[in-house]
Image (spheres, rainbow, N blue to C red):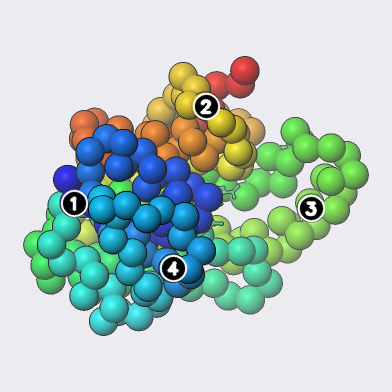
Amino acid sequence: MRLIVFGANSPTGRLVTAMAMAAGHTVTAITRRPADFPFCDHRVQIADADVMDADAVDWVVRDHDAVLSVIGVPLSLKPVTVCSQVAFNVVKGMMNHGVRRLLCVGSAGLDAADLSRVGLLCQRAIRPVVLACGPAVQQDVRRMEGIVRETGLDWTLFRPGRLVTRSDVTDYRITAVPAPRTLTSRVDLAHALIHEVTHRDHVGETVHVATVPC
Ligand SMILES: NC(=O)c1ccc[n+]([C@@H]2O[C@H](COP(=O)([O-])OP(=O)(O)OC[C@H]3O[C@@H](n4cnc5c(N)ncnc54)[C@H](OP(=O)(O)O)[C@@H]3O)[C@@H](O)[C@H]2O)c1
């Protein structure tokens, strides 16, 4: 399939790109930092685009079979609109060009309780930041999810828990409801995205991805 990956240069996006190539797909990788993108391969085309730019998004979306978005934003005290604006621009471009399949990564939630697995000192430092800045990002992610659900496209929304980095894919779980304090490894999330784009098990569904502890 011809895939386009928004956020391809993120830690998760790089794994998605690698797994997509390994599965025989071609990838258009969207990043504002093309010089940092680690893949140079005939199966990958790099496009330098800001997803806040609707015209740029419209241009790159054409001629693809599926769109994957792992766009994310840092925590902020200011109002956040990136995720919802990206959803709006991507959906508009897809509709303009008859691209129907959309897989988007949102979030299970930025709950301070999720920090229980990090050290006490770290918790004390991070918890106030999450409590102060989390709601702005979370509200924008929820707006993004609402835009995607109302499109009538063949969408799947992925809600990982707190992301961690592991080297190997686990026997991760895909569930309709979140388990409390879920951790999701980026490699499991990438695997779930590439599996879904091929198998279409969860079209029109919001799914949670939970890494199995080892
Ligand atoms: N961290 C967590 O615990 C957590 C929890 C739940 C869900 N998530 C979600 O999981 C996904 C992957 O997270 P991650 O930590 O691997 O990646 P990340 O560090 O959140 O990277 C996000 C990517 O978004 C891209 N991006 C942001 N604004 C953009 C813009 N205006 N135009 C183009 N690209 C833009 C950046 O691309 P460039 O800088 O390359 O342009 C960056 O590579 C994200 O959707 C995140 O929200 C994360």
Q: Is residue 19 left or right of residue 130?
A: left
Q: Which residue is mark 4?
A: 34
The quarter of the displayed image where residue 20 is located: top left
Q: Which kind of residue does numbered mark 4 sit on? A: Pro
User: Which residue is at a point 48% across and 26% down the rendered structure image?
Assistant: 169
Q: For the residues marked 4 and 3, what is the alpha-carbon distance in whole angstroms?
A: 31 Å
- Mark linked to residue 126: 3
Q: For the residues marked 2 and 3, what is the alpha-carbon distance in whole angstroms?
A: 27 Å
Which of the two discs, 2 and 3, labels the residue nearer the N terminus?
Answer: 3
Q: Is residue 63 left or right of residue 80?
A: left
At numbered mark 4, what does the secondary structure look like: helix, strand or loop? helix
Q: Which kind of residue does numbered mark 3 sit on? A: Ile
User: Which residue is at a point 88% across and 39% down the rendered structure image?
Assistant: 120
Q: Are marks 4 and 3 in contact (CB under 8 Å)?
A: no
Instruction: Say which of 96 and 169 sits in front.
Output: 169
Residue 97 visible somewhere in the drawing? yes
Which of the two discs, 4 and 3, labels the residue nearer the N terminus?
Answer: 4
Mark 3 surroundings: few (<14), some (14-19) or many (≥20) residues within 10 A:
some
Number of numbered markers: 4
State the image coordinates of residue 96 (x, y, percent, origin top left). 12, 71
